[in-house]
Image (tube, rainbow, N blue to C red):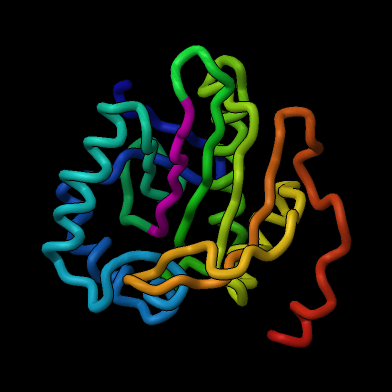
Amino acid sequence: MEPFVLATDRVRLSVPTPADVDRVAEICADPAIARWTTVPSPYTRSDAEGFVSGFVNDGWAQEKDFTWAVRAPGETDGPVLGMVGMSRAGEPGTELSGEVGYWCAPDARGGGLTTEAARLVVDWSLDPEGLGLGVVRWRANVGNWASRRVAWKLGFRFEGTLRRFGQQRGRLVDSWVASLVPEDRRGPNEPWPAEAVTAA
């Protein structure tokens, strides 16, 4: 599949390119991204080059991992403000599933940009004219309230906590999991957890 742009009047999503390598390396050196994601730590420019030229390009070519850079709205690509991706799983001829993932640059947090970007990708993934997935799943390390809040806003239904389900740089970590199916309402379906306010 050839990469394509997803856009609204608030955000532009386009495939990251070699021109974005330095910016990706800068963002992924952020301690919060290292804490909550599986990116290498410490993160180097070489890691960013491998991500853009390897993972991103291979994912689109194999129609398995679809990755977009999050940018400000407009007709041309501006600096990377975040990243959002959808990983597709399943065999041809069967109902397929996906998992959404995202991160945001420190200087772009708090304005709803990640929610807007993730909504575009999730809606395309569940659309029969898009990937036509039967379910999209979200997973995050326990304690990642920022990621959970995005999933909550998009209508993901929290399924629970799986002990030592995730892997992060060679160790097993407890994971929160949630799901969204095509017929679900795209908005919060339950109160925001009280413990999130306590933890903030």
Among the 4 quarters of the image, the one containing residue 192: bottom right
Please state which of residues 75 and 104 is positioned toward the viewer in this rendering.
104
32 shown above or below 130:
below
The x and y percentages for residue 182 are: 71, 29
Residue 199 higher or lower than 3, as above or below: below
Left or right relative to 97: residue 51: left
Residue 143 in the image, given as x and y percentages of width and height: 61, 76
- In the displayed structure, does residue 187 sit left or right of residue 78? right
Image quadrant where one finds the C terminus: bottom right
Image quadrant where one finds the N terminus = top left
Residue 10 in magenta stretch: no
The answer to which quarter of the image holds residue 64 is: top left
Tell me: residue 28, above or below residue 81.
Answer: below
User: Residue at position x 31%, y 39% from top?
Assistant: 15
**Residue positioned most to the top:** 93
Foreground residue among 191 and 178: 178
Query: What type of secondary structure mainly makes up the magenta span?
Result: strand
Q: Is residue 35 visible?
A: yes
Residue 88 is one of the magenta-drawn residues: yes
Q: Position of residue 50 (x, y in %)?
A: 16, 53
Between 105 and 35, the one nearer to me in the picture? 35
Residue found at the far left of this picture: 46
Q: Residue at x 36, y 39 (%)?
A: 14
Residue at 47% x, 55% y: name it.
Answer: 102
Residue 42 position within the rendered picture, expressed as x and y whole percent measured from the top left: 23, 78
Instruction: Note whether residue 110 is visible.
Output: no
Q: In the drawing, does residue 122 fall left or right of residue 87? A: right
Q: How many marks?
A: 0
Q: Which residues are magenta?
A: 81-90
